[in-house]
Amino acid sequence: MALKLFWVSFTLFFGFLVVAFCDQDGFLSLSCGGAKSYVDSSKIKWVSDDTFITTGNTTTVEYAEGTSSSSSIALRFFPESRGRNCYKLPVENMSSIVLVRAQFVYKNYDGLEKPPAFSVSLGRAVVSTVNLTHKDPWIDEFLWPVSKDTLSFCLQAIPDGGAPVISSLEVRPLPRGAYQSGMEDIPNKSLRKSYRINSGYTNGSLRYPVDPFDRIWDADQSYTPFHSSPGFNIPLSFNLSSLKESPPLDVLQTARVLARQDVLHYNLPLDKLGDYYIVLYFASILPVSASFDILINGDVELSEFTIRTSEASTLYFKQKGIINLDIALRSIIFYPQINALEVYEIVDIPPETSSTTGNIFFCKSDGFFPLSSADSILPELTVSALQVIEQATGFDLGWQDDPCFPTPWDHIECKGSTVTSLDLSDINLRSISPTFGDLLDLKILNLHNTSLSGATQNLGSLQHLEKLNLSFNQLTSFGSDMNGLVNLRVLDLHNNSLQGIVPDSLGELKNLHLLNLENNKLQGTLPLSLNRESLEVRTSGNLCLSFSTMACNDVSSNPSIETPQVTIVTNKKHGAHRHLAIILGAAGGTLFALLLTSLLVLLYINKRKTEATYTTSASIDMRNWNAERIFSYKEIKAATNNFKEVIGRGSFGSVYLGKLSDGKPVAVKVRFDKTQLGADSFINEVHLLSQIHHQNLVSLEGFCHELKHQILVYEYLPGGSLADHLYGPNSQKVSLSWIRRLKIAVDAAKGLDYLHNGSDPRIIHRDVKCSNILLDCEMNAKVCDFGLSKQVTLADATHVTTVVKGTAGYLDPEYYSTQQLTEKSDVYSFGVVLLELICGREPLTHSGTPDSFNLVLWVTIISFSF
């Protein structure tokens, strides 16, 4: 029996110890640079910081704290630091607010006697500037509103400040709802401790386990005028349930009480001019009910405040734009008293680049409904896109947390919380991925010398872009989406391998001031739309580029002859040549011109014969594809009334309304892309459409394939494209009911199903989007534009490995990452079309809130919120 009583007593005693000394739920105590775990005198367990940070060096230094003997403490320092050095602190399942306390110690650990200065940030906010010349050690304490599972605590060097250093880092959960009363916009504010005073107590500081939240309550001393009132320590019990901050009972049992004076003062100097949050604690430890006025910096904040016997209460005040703080209690009845006070600097948390601001909306069949902003702290497309780009570079660019705050990432510039500039020059990118098209706020993009090849692509959605540098790459052709860069001012393409002619679409960029095409392989006539005073065009180092139709005719017929380098700069005055130079030039040039002309004529005749042979051969091959009809260019001009009425533009070229000799209306697509890529697209579409026939696929009426002319003639669908009805001018004329939307979706699905399962060989469209779904008068839908389509020639093939092509916003991520094209890629794109039909939104847009820029991401976010 005695043995049982012993074990029961032991168990109860041990349980008491656990409750009293080990109740540390949520405590995280890091020994920065330490190698081993240990338990301190307060029974708090400390662990090494190795698993919470990946940068920095470690060392130890002899240091005596207070009156204790010297001991060795660990440090972590960051030599030659440029970017952020960040701890990732887990705060999952903690309260709504946490205390973060850091100690920084120098003590001449490096023997240089140069204490460093550096900045400290929590999350997106720079919360402190540590200067160990002024105070060593330096302790900072912050209260942070929890919004994510992890919290970044970062040290960052400042110019000539030396290497940041830290010795300890602590995280403590605080009571829910604490330190929020009287504060506005709580999620966007942090608090930095200036003072926490245990009024009336002078025997050192108090912390855990006296305070279960491990706040450090400093002794009430050195605050002028000190001797104006005595301190009292009277052990009474109070009902603390109404105090959200849950101050320790030991703190409330001491007080500073006014005696033989009219006013009790706390005069507290502050670090800097700013806004401050003040918490005052009152608990009556005297058998009287005192009444007094509360003044802050001479202004009465509360009149005739009364403390009732055995009651405890808390008052909150906020002061804006102050550098000194004087808290005064002016006596009215009996003895004013105060038990504790806390003063915090209010630190603004910048708006998150990767979060939603305001309300977002989701769509249902019967309308749009708001999603509360409390549920919308969600990742933004920009951050995800940048992280994908970082992975594509193969380098660790140090892109952690928020791109803009507390300081912008390397290679990035921000305006406020918006990423406006991206400089990846001299990094081996190899291609412009569709992810670049998600950086909708970019104004400057520098991809100089990044090993790009092929066509410029995936940039058409960057409508705010003003400067684009693609120089010193291996680009061979102009992309079809350049005309989407409506605000572009500078386009630098010099030192590439661009071939063919300069497309008319560049002339549509009305804000363009500088176009640099130097040192490419371009030739032919420059679009007249580029010949304007406000635009400077640089063309030296090409085969021949001129605004004159005559200047390059002879040279273009013989590209093997190198032409002189010419720079065209509009709005530039040319000086008169000297007469002697003209005479000598004319005399010498006449003889040379005769010889050159003879040679060019011979070469031109040979070239015409070669081209005629090629055209005849190609036409014979294309006749064998069972095309409906082969038109001459003369017939095309007559059918379109000399290309009078433009009804659309696409990646291939302009589309004109035409009428055949039998009166049948047709859509005539004229190719302006003279590169090999454009020619391949033309031949590919003729070949495919000559073999397939389905009621939900646009039919090919014929084509024209003559020298310098490649034209496709389709059946004319007067209803326009689905994109026109959802977002274009037709959206204001004809309302798409849910029945019509469903029918359009079914029609398009039937067309795709025929391509995937009904044709032999199978065909993958590769560019399914709303603008490639056309409607007739009865709103029947047909899929069009097969220029990028691929045939799966092997019956049992699971995929086709090919260069990634498609449209940003519709592109299958798996196809992009693996370059393995399957029918599923079309299904993904068709899924985006379905989302557009349901929600009436474009796949990429710059309107609304940041997390709604990408339709697929937006819908994914909403689906997880239910």
Image (cartoon, helix red, strand yellow):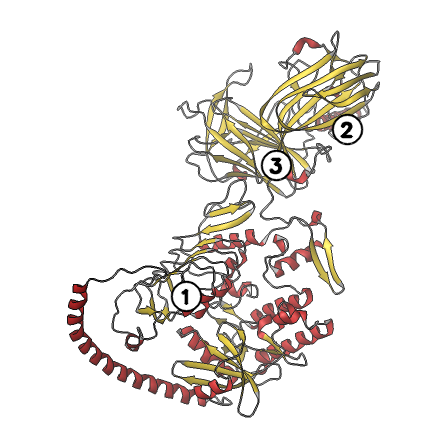
Q: Of all residues shown, which one is farthest toward the bottom?
A: 662
Of pointers 1 and 3, the one earlier in the residue sequence: 3
Residue identified by numbered label 1:
530
The part of the image, by quadrant, that contains residue 808 is bottom right
Residue identified by numbered label 2:
243
Q: Type of residue at label 2?
A: Leu
Q: Type of residue at label 3?
A: Asp
Marks 2/3: CA–CA distance:
25 Å
- Label 3 crowd bin: few (<14), some (14–19), many (20+), radius 10 Å: some
Residue 795 placement, left or right of 516: right
Of pointers 2 and 3, the one earlier in the residue sequence: 2
Query: In the displayed structure, would residue 303 be above or below residue 165?
Result: above
Disc sitting over residue 348 in the figure: 3
Pinpoint residue 296: horizontal percent, then vertical percent: 69, 22
Residue 261 placement, left or right of 415: right
Pinpoint residue 397: horizontal percent, then vertical percent: 46, 47
Q: Nearer the viewer, residue 690 or 653?
A: 653
Nearer the camera: disc 2 or disc 3: 3
Query: In the displayed structure, would residue 764 be above or below residue 296?
Result: below
